[in-house]
Image: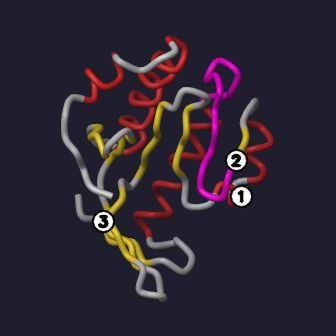
Amino acid sequence: MKKTGGSVAAFIAGVTPAKRRRDAETMVALLREVTGREPELWGTIIGFGSCHYRYPTGTEGDVPVAAFAPRTQATTVYLLDAGAYPDRMSRLGDHTTGAGCLYLKDLDRVDTAVLREIVAEDYRRVLSGETGDAVYTVTG
């Protein structure tokens, strides 16, 4: 994955439906606060910081340290392992998960303080190297 550049504000302005656009603005503020970094576009993903990962198998690439994508059906928050936070997920509110994704259909239906905890812990894990099999090196 590579940074594609462009205006994050212009990208968000084009997000539909309006609820997803509102949620994207909230997510930018939350991730900016948690990471202390400015958002950048990685295609249709809004990322904060960058890192290079490498698995023991040799698979490697570049990804944002923290990221989300305002998709039509839900806001997708990218995590190392969505299953790593069972207590917090039980307190989060309306959501679904995939292996490394947290799907939020409406931020008004989740506890944003708990969401902030999840994102902050995931960010801390990447920075500290607590990432399981993969090795992450922060590059920006």
Magenta residue span: 98-112
Where does residue 134 sit, x and y in percent of width and height? 48, 77
Q: Residues within 10 Å of mark 1 (few under 14, many from 20)?
A: some
> In the image, what residue occupies the spot 45% across and 64% down?
126
Quadrant assignment, res 33: top left
Q: Residues within 10 Å of mark 2 (few under 14, many from 20)?
A: some
* Residue assigned mark 1: 83
Question: Is tag 2's residue or tag 3's residue first in the polypeptide sequence?
Answer: 2
Three-letter amino acid code of the residue under disc 2: Thr
Up-down relation of residue 116 to residue 16 (above or below):
below
Q: CA distance from mark 1 to mark 3?
A: 23 Å
- Dot 2 lies on which element? strand
> Could you tell me if the residues under marks 1 and 2 are in contact, i.e. CB atoms within 8 Å?
yes
Three-letter amino acid code of the residue under disc 3: Val
Quick one: quadrant of the N terminus? bottom left
- Dot 1 lies on which element? helix
Three-letter amino acid code of the residue under disc 1: Gly
Mark number displayed over residue 138? 3
Of 124 and 57, nearer the camera is 57
> In the image, what residue occupies the spot 47% across and 88% down?
56
Mark number displayed over residue 97? 2
Quadrant assignment, res 60: bottom left
Is 130 left or right of 101, judged from the image as shown? left
Is 4 left or right of 127, judged from the image as shown? left
